Image: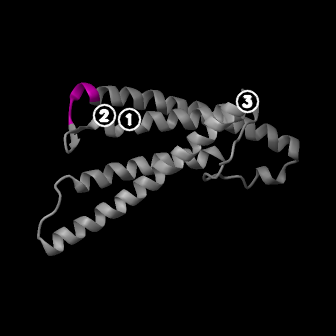
Amino acid sequence: MECRINKIYKLLLKVETGVLVTLLLSMIIMAIVQIIMRNVFTSGLLWADAYVRIAVLWMALVGAMVASRSGKHIAIDVLIRTLNKKLQHIIKRITDAFTAIVCLLVMYYSFEFVKFEYEDGGQAFANIPNWLCESIIPFAFLIIGLRYLFSALFNLRHTA
């Protein structure tokens, strides 16, 4: 059973990384297409700039998810390095718990924001609703919050 769960987890990590790479490549291709179309054909895709803005949001949040899975995020740990290992471990678990709480609060309020956007019915680009583009916000903070919660409670920090 544990082997199957481990395989599923590794597959999810690969999907996460694949989404990040796909977003980056699509942004680069879209920017190049826009530059060529504007300079050669004096026109461009009406929705391309909005797509790139949304892709930046998704890339930032999926990138944060990827960074959180192995502790490769930005951290200020100058003082903690001077402490003994046992105290470092305790402080790490406390900061992980605090991070989880903050992320889960952000997830809740961003979910409320996405619900308001859904009710508003606005369009982002190419008939894609705003709420769908913004749905990455609560999802990413849920994943990050759960990772830090598991790290705080069970000292779990998986790597890719």
The residue under label 2 is 131
Residue 20 image position (x, y, % from top left): 47, 51
Amino acid under disc 3: Glu
- 126 relative to 82, above or below: above
The residue under label 3 is 2
Q: Residue at horizontal 31%, vertical 55%?
A: 52
- 80 relative to 32, above or below: above
Q: Which mark is residue 135?
A: 1
Residue 118 image position (x, y, % from top left): 27, 28
Tell which residue pokes out farthest to the bottom in this image: 40
Q: Which mark is residue 113?
A: none
Amino acid under disc 1: Ser
**Which residues are the magenta region?**
118-122
Give the side of residue 90 with respect to residue 127, left or right.
right
Residue 144 image position (x, y, % from top left): 57, 38
Q: CA distance from mark 3 to mark 2?
A: 36 Å
Pointer 3 or 2: first along the chain = 3
98 in magenta: no
Amino acid under disc 2: Trp
CB contact under 8 Å: marks 3 and 1: no
Give the side of residue 14 with respect to residue 107, left or right.
right
